[in-house]
Amino acid sequence: AIAKKIDRVIGNRGWFKECRNLQVHFSPPGISNHSSCILQLNRPTYSGARPFMYLNVWASHPSFLGLVKEVWSQPVGGSPLEAVGRKLRMLKPVLKELHRKYFKDLSTACTSLKQDIESQQAILDEDPTNKEARSREK
């Protein structure tokens, strides 16, 4: 079967007037036959530090719960809300160290796998009848 690209972006005059620096990128189709559409507004870049983000994969590590309990059991002063804030600030470097030791290469591996899948999909997009590319994609 030959694939057709029917995905599109729709906007109105007022929206395009407000969003002058708009770029649209269609990624290669993934599991379904639809392409995701990424709208990029070229806004001023933020130069501050990245916010701390909790990663669910940390909870799968055997020492995670013990590390959290150890930090959380330490006494801190202040109101209950201040105590929570202080404990979270104390927990941040502990979780960063856990990430550095055991999980730092996961994002690189995921990115590499995603690039491999996208390159195979691009080959299939150019020639949907390529049997070798179909078998590699699976």
Image (tube, rainbow, N blue to C red):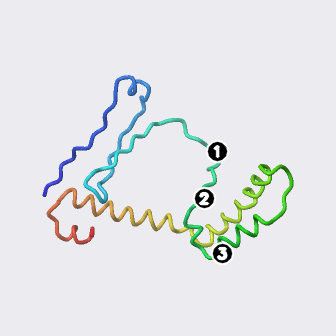
Does the residue at mark 2 contact the one at mark 3 (Cβ under 8 Å)? no
- Marks 1 and 3, how far apart in space? 31 Å
Residue designated by label 3: 63
Q: Depth-wise, is mark 2 or mark 1 nearer the camera?
A: 2
Residue at point 80%, 51% (across, down): 80
Extreme front residue here? 80
Q: Depth-wise, is mark 1 or mark 3 nearer the camera?
A: 3
Chain-order first, disc 2 or disc 1: 1
Chain-order first, disc 1 or disc 3: 1
Assign the N terminus to one quadrant of the image: bottom left
Q: Amino acid at mark 2?
A: Tyr
- Marks 2 and 1, how far apart in space? 19 Å
Chain-order first, disc 2 or disc 3: 2
Q: Secondary structure at mark 1?
A: loop
Residue at point 62%, 76% (across, down): 62
**Viewer-closest of 110 and 71:** 71
Q: Position of residue 13 (x, y in %)?
A: 35, 23
Q: Which mark is residue 48?
A: 1
Q: Mark 2 packing: few (<14 Cα in 10 Å), some, or many (20+)?
A: few
Q: Mark 1 packing: few (<14 Cα in 10 Å), some, or many (20+)?
A: few
Q: Position of residue 6 (x, y in %)?
A: 22, 44
Residue designated by label 2: 54
**Viewer-closest of 134 and 66:** 66
